Image: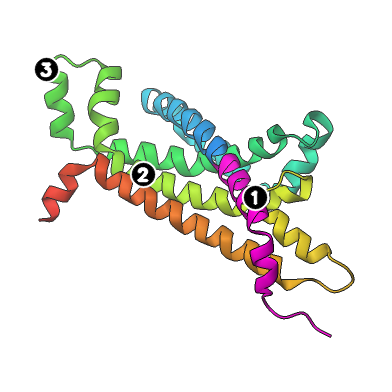
Amino acid sequence: MSQPFVRWDWVVGHLDDIGTHTIEHLRLTGLSMGIGLVLAIALSAFALRWRRSYAPIIGVTGVLFTIPSLAAFAVLVPFTGLTTTTATVPLVTYTLLILVRNIVTGVDGVPSDIRDAALGMGYRRWRLLWEIELPLALPAIMAGIRIATVTVVGLVTVTSLIGLGGLGSLILQGIRRGSVPFPTPIVVGTIASAALAATLDVGLLGLQRVLTPWLRRSER
């Protein structure tokens, strides 16, 4: 007899497990995005100061972005074991291309007259970057953060293959259950992961609107 597509009694009976896996998913996503953003800001600042370094930085981060997650985990496991580090390192590398490109593009998009005015007022290069260019580049930066976050949420599901939880554990549980896959946890894990990505995207969009009040005023 085939399994129903969704068994609601299973869902109700496993709400605690679903909540635990959601928190694990959020923790890995937040950790990866936090580290990735710090590294991306540092790389972007370096690229903006020394322009010739931008192409190599984008080239290296682009190559890292193309490495399949399973291959990255397989390479790291002998060195870092089945640990959070093994999951975090590849997830961080997947954020760098998106974030660095958006940060640099956003800063380059700052009007030259604003930059010249700040320099005329005595702003030094690093003060100009932190106090003028990065705030004005926030729309492009936040767009990159949103894209990177949604990407990482999707990739975190794969970390269940190395025993690190997340909503991918539900999908894996459904696939491995007996000789016939049990569809309910697969459906729940997939929908929950997509809902989490959408929720974070909407939340970051709201944060962007809070951080860029001048854009709201220009829309009126």
- In the rendered structure, find residue 142 and report the number of the disc placed on it: 2
Mark 3 is on which residue type? Met
The quadrant in which the N terminus is found is bottom right
Q: Total label count?
A: 3
Q: Residue at x 30, y 45 (%)?
A: 208
* Marks 1/2: CA–CA distance: 27 Å
Q: Which mark is residue 21?
A: 1
Residue 175: in magenta span: no
Percent coordinates x, y for residue 125 in the rendering? 27, 18
Q: Residue at x 25, y 43 (%)?
A: 210
First in sequence: mark 1 or mark 3? 1
Reading the image, the residue beneath label 3 is 121
Determine whether 45 is above or below 10 in the image: above
Crowding at label 1, few (<14), some or many (≥20) Cα neighbours within 10 Å?
Answer: many
Quadrant in the rendering for residue 9? bottom right
Q: Earlier in the sequence, mark 3 or mark 2?
A: 3
Q: Report the Cα–Cα distance between label 1 and label 3.
A: 52 Å
Mark 1–mark 3 CB contact (< 8 Å): no
Span shown in magenta: 1-29
The numbered dot on residue 103 is none
Amino acid at dot 2: Met
Residue extending farthest right: 179
Q: Mark 1 is on which residue type?
A: His
SS under mark 1? helix
Dot in front, 3 or 2? 2
| Secondary structure mostly seen in the magenta stretch | helix
Q: Quadrant of the C terminus?
A: bottom left
Res 64 → quadrant: top right
